[in-house]
Amino acid sequence: MKMQSLFGLGNSKPKGTSPLEGPPSLRAQRAEGDLHLLTRQEWWLWFSACFVTVLSGTAFGLTTFPKFFRHAEHFYELRSDQVRWAVLCLVLLFNAWLLYRQWSFRRERRELMGQGAGSETKAGQISDPTGLDPVTGLYTRAFIEQQLGKEIARAKRQNTSLSLATIHLDEFSEVVKRYGQSATDMALKELARRLKKSCRGCDFAARLATDDFLLVLPECGLGEVKLVLNRIGTLELTSGSMKINLTFTTGWVDYQTGDMPTDLLRRATEILHLYENAAKESFAATLAPH
């Protein structure tokens, strides 16, 4: 069996959306918060438009009083018609900027509404109202979101360690094509059994996507995480006449003082993206001429 561990994080920015970035409900809440902020910006824009309108109207009104423009002793001299043209040019420039801001706000609103709607239908992610994955019986992302905040609060209160271990199944889509869905589900159930068996009483395992799993390990430092992962062992089982071999990659992150749940999940997300990059590089190296 092939088993790898990744410790470093790449400098490149992750691409796409990982299930560790939060459940669809959390991403929808973030999009909704951004929409509220955008609405406040739009109100400030209209307030500015009203203020400029009043100011320009006042300036036009003052041009009707010739005494404001009769100062021959000054080194400059402005006529009332010049002031009107200047105010008119400024109003036109402001209106052009106002139209641009309205266009940009509408574009941002469309993007945010698309994110809010799209977060509910991400392919490959596990979501069940019961909080349990129907195939493996492991917890889902909804449970992770709630429980991780509690575990961080306890780690802060008791000054204990907290770690997240990630498990990524290599080339899982190819495994499904090769052995079929029923045989693959049997292999996933065996993996879930191994994860539960490797956990202590305070640990819990979750399935975040079709090929991504997570272990939340309270009171477990980075030095102990590897021992927990080693308990999983090799995943080789027989289904009928077929021998199924599931290979996976593991990694882990630990809680740092001041971390929020999103901070831990973001770093775990970066590790999962490293898995994808490493798999692509390995595939490219296999195809390269020797």
Image: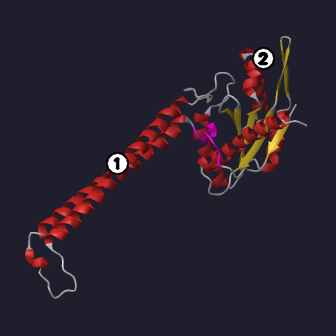
Give the image quarter of residue 94: bottom left
Q: Which residues are drawn in magenta?
A: 13-22
Place of residue 122 in the rendered image (x, y in percent of width and height, measured from the top left): 57, 31
Per the image, is 18 magenta?
A: yes
Q: The residue under label 2 is which amino acid type?
A: Tyr
Sequence-wise first label, 2 or 1: 1
From what the image shows, is residue 169 above or below residue 156? above
Residue drawn where x is 72% and y is 25% of the image: 173
Question: For residue 147: magenta?
Answer: no
Q: Is residue 115 visible?
A: yes
Q: Amino acid at mark 1?
A: Gln
Say if residue 231 shows up in the picture: no
Number of the label disc, if any, that sits on residue 203: none
117 on left or right of 92: right
Q: Position of residue 24 (x, y in %)?
A: 54, 35
Seen as rendered, the residue at the extreme right is 290
* Image quarter (top left, top right, bottom left or bottom right) of the N terminus: top right
- The mark found on residue 102 in the picture is 1
Residue 164, percent from left and from top: 71, 44
- Mark 2 lies on a secondary structure that is helix
Q: Quadrant of residue 272?
A: top right
Image coloring type: secondary structure
User: Viewer-proximal residue, 48 or 227?
Assistant: 48
> Quick one: which residue is furthest to the bottom in this view?
73
Query: Which numbered marker is on residue 179?
Result: 2
Quarter the C terminus occupies: top right
Relative image position of residue 28 (x, y in whole percent): 49, 38
User: What crowding class fits label 1: few (fewer than 14 Cα within 10 Å), some (14-19), or many (20 or more)?
Assistant: some
Decide if residue 283 is on the left or right side of residue 26: right
